[in-house]
Amino acid sequence: MKTIYPDNYTEEDKAMYDDMMMRGDALIGKKVNKMEAFLIDLAARMTINQVKGLSSTLSKEEMESVRLQHKNAMSQLIHETPDDIWKGREDEHPLNKTIEEYYQDNIVKPDILDTDRHIVEC
């Protein structure tokens, strides 16, 4: 797969990015969960931006506010998805079903039981 670099990356930035990605890929499955592999790319890009002196457009106060909101959200045991996200969608909201309904939807019933395989001789 070919890597697409941002337009403002120099050859040195590209080499640094590739090096960080290679080191990060070595950690997948050991220290980094496979589902969180995208964080390696994000961290590499953020590191290069910091080295180049680029930062977000947020002020320090706004960054602290975002950090506090994130910390508060992560400390909650329950996260509620706003209902307005599902407005205009044809599919049903996934939290509208009970556990029993999901079980009934996903249960697989065999058509014909093969009784010969289920008999255990002593």
Image: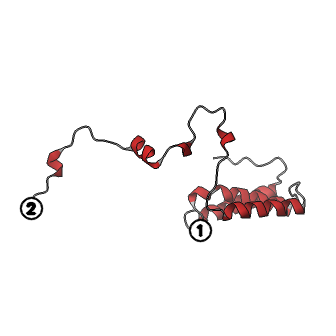
Furthest toward the bottom, the residue is 31
26 relative to 91, above or below? below
Check disc 1 and give the amino acid type.
Lys
- SS for tag 1? loop
Would you name the residue on which mark 2 appears?
Answer: 122
Label disc, if present, on residue 31 of the rendered structure: 1
The quarter holding residue 69 reads bottom right
* Amino acid type, mark 2: Cys
Task: Point out the image quarter for the C terminus.
Answer: bottom left
> Is residue 58 visible in the rendered structure shown here?
yes
Q: Residue at x 65, y 48 (%)?
A: 81
Q: Residues within 10 Å of mark 2 (few under 14, many from 20)?
A: few
Between 104 and 29, the residue placed more toward the observer is 104
**Residue at position x 28%, y 41% in the image:** 110
Q: Position of residue 50 (x, y in %)?
A: 84, 62
Query: Which numbered disc, 1 or 2, marks the residue that appears first in the sequence?
Result: 1
The residue lying at 71 percent from left, 58 percent from top is 18
